[in-house]
């Protein structure tokens, strides 16, 4: 376990300090985990989240068709007509991404909303990096708002036998949805403050962009509907969402090929899929699989239980803030999967209702990924979009927005859960 921790720590230090080489560092680290035996060959396949990789690949291709249709440019025009300045444009886009992300996977949300932000920034001749970061962290925040917003929310719902409405009202009390929205309100104020210097007025266009084809927009809207519908299907295959995204991309390619007779279409779609982002996530999945196999995440869960002792408030506090810390570096899916039975056992030993600890775990683990550029798949996808557009995102650029945003979102939820469920 010690060797796994050392390799894991070195990997993340290098990825945070050498942003240009994150993909290579993750893949080399994954190879070392496999070669050393810390990730056995029979565990490799199970460590990779193919659903996320397929979703990213499919959505990136669909988004390229979406961009080619000029719909993002039109949406950018509409946003610019409604907001008075750049500051409010950034806040509005982040809130818009958050609303979508409450019902659709965070990665898909970022991939859909980011092109609109890029178009706005292109028209305004301003740096899109903080815009995309704000969209990514806002998407991660809203993932805990509903049962279908994020994998960790689905895991909690399944483990605690909660249905869709329980996230709104649970046991006669306002549920986690309202805690997330309270955090969203506080974090929107933080975003407004972070963009306080961006007061330049937005010039009003006399003409709007003309959309050349509405089919890609219909396909993206259809993807949202299908992803929401799929979330209600019990015992569905793990790669259902990924197959939906790839299937719609194939439909979009066939339609466009027939309409335009573009012989280079397949090549353009392949280029639209960011292989560096896919590679980074692929490597990280294997790294997390390695430390999970070596018992690191189980040890973290046991440590949290020991730190909490028998005091409910101390235990709740440790779970929330340790989840924020660990989820900044550890994939929150295996972490939450490990912690759910631990919390259930702790609550039984203390003779308390586990709801407080469950909600504290979900809010902390979901939002912790916003602290670092590699803490969540949505962050990695957003940074990949910026890199393809010619912008490098340094760790300091990300944490300048991510950490204040996380604190503004977690603190209200932390107080809210204690007051209502303690």
Image (cartoon, helix red, strand yellow):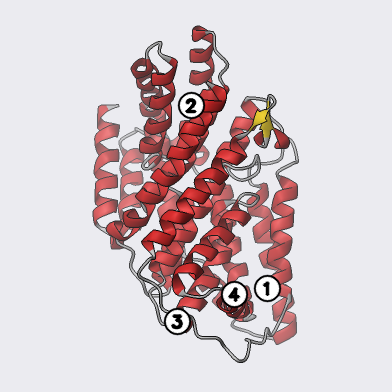
Find residue 87 and name its label: none
| Mark nearer the N terminus (3 vs 4) | 4
| Mark nearer the N terminus (3 vs 1) | 3
Q: What is the x, y in percent for residue 326?
A: 37, 36
Relative horizontal placement of residue 219, taking residue 382 as reference (left or right): right
Report crowding for label 4: few under 14, some 14 to 19, many 20 or more residues within 10 A (C-alpha).
few
Residue depth check, mark 2 versus mark 3: number of the one nearer the observer: 3
| Mark nearer the N terminus (2 vs 3) | 3
Which residue is label 4 attached to?
Answer: 82
Relative horizontal placement of residue 34, taking residue 209 as reference (left or right): left
Measured in 3D between alpha carbons, the distance from the residue under mark 3 to the one under mark 1, in whole angstroms, is 32 Å
Report crowding for label 1: few under 14, some 14 to 19, many 20 or more residues within 10 A (C-alpha).
some
Residue in the image at 48% along x and 83% along y: 123
Which residue is label 3 attached to?
Answer: 124
Which residue is label 2 attached to?
Answer: 338
Which residue is label 1 attached to?
Answer: 253
Q: What is the x, y in percent for residue 131?
A: 44, 66
Relative horizontal placement of residue 160, taking residue 276 as reference (left or right): right
> Secondary structure under badge 2?
helix
Q: What is the x, y in percent for residue 10?
A: 24, 43
Report crowding for label 3: few under 14, some 14 to 19, many 20 or more residues within 10 A (C-alpha).
some
> Secondary structure under badge 1?
helix
Image quadrant for the N terminus? top left
| Mark nearer the N terminus (2 vs 1) | 1
Measured in 3D between alpha carbons, the distance from the residue under mark 2 to the one under mark 3, in whole angstroms, is 46 Å
């Amino acid at each position: 376990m010690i060797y796994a921790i050392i390799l894991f720590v070195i990997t993340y230090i290098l990825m945070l300090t050498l942003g240009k080489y994150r993909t290579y560092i993750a893949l080399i680290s994954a190879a070392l985990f496999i070669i050393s035996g810390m990730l056995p060959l029979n565990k490799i396949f199970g460590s990779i989240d193919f659903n996320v990789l397929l979703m990213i690949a499919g959505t990136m291709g669909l988004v390229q068709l979406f961009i080619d249709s000029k719909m993002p440019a039109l949406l950018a025009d509409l946003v610019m007509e409604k907001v008075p300045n750049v500051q409010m444009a950034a806040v509005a886009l982040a809130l818009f991404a958050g609303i979508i992300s409450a019902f659709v996977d965070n990665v898909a949300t970022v991939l859909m909303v980011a092109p609109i932000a890029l178009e706005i920034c292109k028209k305004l001749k301003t740096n899109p990096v903080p815009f995309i970061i704000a969209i990514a962290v806002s998407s991660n925040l809203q993932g805990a708002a509903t049962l279908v917003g994020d994998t960790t929310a689905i895991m909690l719902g399944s483990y605690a036998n909660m249905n869709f409405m329980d996230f709104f009202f649970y046991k006669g009390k306002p549920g986690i949805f309202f805690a997330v929205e309270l955090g969203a309100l506080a974090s929107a104020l933080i975003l407004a403050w972070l963009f306080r210097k961006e007061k330049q007025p937005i010039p009003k266009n006399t003409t709007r962009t003309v959309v050349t084809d509405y089919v890609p927009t219909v396909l993206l809207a259809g993807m949202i509907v299908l992803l929401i519908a799929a979330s209600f299907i019990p015992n569905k295959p793990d790669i259902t969402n990924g197959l939906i995204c790839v299937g719609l991309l194939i439909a979009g390619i066939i339609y466009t090929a027939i309409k335009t007779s573009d012989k280079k279409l397949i090549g353009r779609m392949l280029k639209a899929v960011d292989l560096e982002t896919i590679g980074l996530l692929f490597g990280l999945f294997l790294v997390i699989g390695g430390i999970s196999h070596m018992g690191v995440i189980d040890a973290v869960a046991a440590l949290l239980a020991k730190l909490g002792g028998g005091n409910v408030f101390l235990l709740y506090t440790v779970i929330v803030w340790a989840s924020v810390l660990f989820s900044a570096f550890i994939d929150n899916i295996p972490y939450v999967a490990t912690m759910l039975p631990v919390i259930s056992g702790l609550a039984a030993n203390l003779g308390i209702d586990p709801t407080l600890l469950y909600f504290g775990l979900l809010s902390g683990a979901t939002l912790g990924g916003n602290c670092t550029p590699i803490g969540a798949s949505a962050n990695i996808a957003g940074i990949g979009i910026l890199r393809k557009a010619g912008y490098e995102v340094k760790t300091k650029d990300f944490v300048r927005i991510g950490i204040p945003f996380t604190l503004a979102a977690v603190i209200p939820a932390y107080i809210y859960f204690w007051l209502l469920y303690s």
